Amino acid sequence: MIVCIAEKPSVARDIAEVLGAHSRREGYIEGNGYQVTWTFGHLCTLKEPHEYTPSWKSWSLSSLPMIPPRFGIKLIGNPSYEKQFKVIEGLMQKADEIINCGDAGQEGELIQRWVMQKAGARCPVKRLWISSLTEEAIREGFAKLKDQADFQPLYEAGLSRAIGDWLLGMNATRLYTIKYGQNKQVLSIGRVQTPTLALIVNRQLEIQNFTPRQYWELKTVYRDTTFSALIKKSEEELMLEEDKKKEAAKKTKKEEENRGIDPIESLEQGESLVEQIRNSPFAITDVSKKEGREYPPRLFDLTSLQVECNKKFGYSADETLKIIQSLYEKKVATYPRVDTTFLSDDIYPKCPGILKGLRDYEVLTTPLVGKTLTKSKKVFDNTKVTDHHAIIPTGQHPQNLTDMERRVFDMIARRFIAVFYPDCKVATTTVLGEVESIEFRVTGKQILEPGWRVVFGVPENVNAPEDKDEKEGEEESVLPAFVEGESGPHLPILNEKWTQPPRPYTEATLLRAMETAGKLVDNDELRDALKENGIGRPSTRAAIIETLFKRNYIRKERKNLIATPTGVELIQIIHEELLKSAELTGIWEKKLREIERKTYDARQFLEELKQMVSEVVMSVLSDNSNRRITIQEAVSVQQEEKGKKETKKRERKPATPKKKAAPTKPAAEPVAGNATPSSAAPSSSTPAGIPAPPKVQATHTPDPLVGQTCPLCGKGTIIKGKAAYGCSEWRSGCTYRKTFE
């Protein structure tokens, strides 16, 4: 008998249907020589500290660092999981062959490997590796099953990440909580969580410490067109340009570009310039028109989709992840946890069929029918695709989508259609003028042929910049016809301005900062590594942000993310830069990718981590200062969640509760033991296994969770049983369960 194990019951049903297995049994589906079973995300987890050494159960500085000689796994303490595991164990021990049908990614590999290890599987194992759940994709995947051994490096990288997060999360959290937390609140430290919090805190301190500087802008109006005086670039600006354009920029051109007057820093200086030019004619010195092309926007990876949904609809990163996961499970979108915007060459022949399946977009797809589709290197590039390609539609007609799902699917579909449309042709006109040796400039832009822009419903005469946040005040438009050498009267204007502080992070800009964290380090090699993965992985960045809310380290004011006093003080009290900088993440991500490519040894990676954890512990223990974190005792977890819920109602945001939002992999939150969150699923989103200090007691208040929308199925509401929370739709197959903390 061949045993197939999927990550969710719904995926198992899809696979069983394709394989011709139709007989439903307790915990699996059987037929045609197959037994198809499933997990609920993580069934297994790394053991808790006290399960290695009983003395590690109590929190004490003398027990640190906690470094087990050998890491072990255990079942998560949940009756449903234990029952399902017994089924899996029985099937696997009798199996002739096992097919790992887990999610095709690092975490999916780890989940299923742990279950197979715990179940004592001994038979040969094959791997199903697919990017969508359509019948065609599943059949194709089973026709091309891979050997499990091919994915050993992927598993080793995932295991190294999990153990590393356990080592750092367990040790640093206990260390900082006991040393600085006054035993009143857990000070949660994590490899990804802490640098992310540091981004928000550092931006907030920049804003608080910002001193506005007054300056003036010199402009003049000639023929109803406003020209701006050229201002010389500072040394810092020139150095920045040098870095950005190092490969292609020509020094002579750069020197030529740095023309203009010195910045106007006093009213007297500005008024003097106005008087200097007021009565002299304005002369046009140069008119240049350059035609160019704008390429279609790139296809979505997970982060860019989350950014766009936050900008356009106000969806949180976590909400977007849940929506795209649902679209994947409804078979209308491809695998979501991806970090590439490219497609592999083998997808190209399938594109006409996918376009044909987008029946609701026939007005846009009809012009492409019967033509050879464009195959741009900006879209199809095997070298830019590793495990999975960009997020695209599968070609199946979407049905029964929620409003939120429909909006997200629409964005994905239009991006996909747009890449096969012609480039947008534009003309950029730059006009230079001069008065009394002072140069002025104005730029206008005109769309000549909209090309791909018609897919997004942009009229031909739209000339404003797409991102107003980035180009505020620089709106370009069609200019009148100017002729070089013409001159005439003009009206000079002096505008008072003040330098502005940087803007607080929103979820959209924080996601981008996490993705491009290379800006925060000096080492070029680390910067390149960070450009690929940044802080965290695409699949975990949403959970990282949610964790910061849950820990009361950040809060939301409208769209802005604001660090709480506790969050600010935590970052300020951490003197070990590796704990709060992007550099640590860069080192880890680089080595983890090398483990995946078999160019770095996982054992060496873990030895280095153990050494680093030991050094961090010694450094903090040697701190003889009496520093403490201020605890905001007035804000209980229940009050915090109630406040968030009320804020959401006021802001008319989508009604997904923040605190209890379950990760996409539903078993990542189960509680193991007494009030101790499982270190299960150690991921970069939360430090593994962070128990509450023994002295913390929960107050008896109305349960804020009961009655909220189920974070797993989105249909039912949370109900309270004798031992755990569940979903009112449990009879319909929803498996959401959360034991009492």
Image: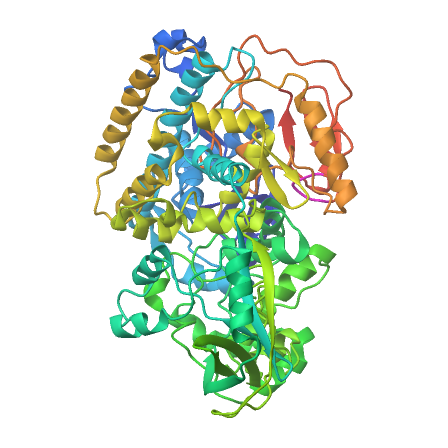
Is residue 80 rendered to the left or right of residue 620? right
**Viewer-closest of 606 and 242:** 242
Residue 711 included in the magenta stretch of the image: yes
The quadrant of the image that shows the C terminus is top right
Q: Which of the 4 quarters of the picture holds residue 490?
A: bottom right
Say if 119 sits above or below 176 in the image: below
In the image shown, does 533 or 717 lie closer to the viewer?
A: 533
- State whether the magenta stretch is mostly helix, strand or loop: loop
Taking the magenta stretch, the answer to whether it contains residue 153 is no
Q: Is residue 402 above or below residue 487?
A: above
**Residue 721: image location, x then y, percent:** 73, 23
Residue at image coords 63%, 62%: 409
Where is residue 358 drawn, in percent x and y?
Answer: 63, 73
Residue 406 point in image, percent of width and height? 69, 61
Q: Which residues are magenta?
A: 710-714
Res 468 seen here? no
- Determine if residue 475 is in view: yes
User: Is residue 159 shown left or right of residue 141?
Assistant: left
Name the residue rendered at 33%, 57% in the picture.
235
Relative side of 589 to 645, left or right: left
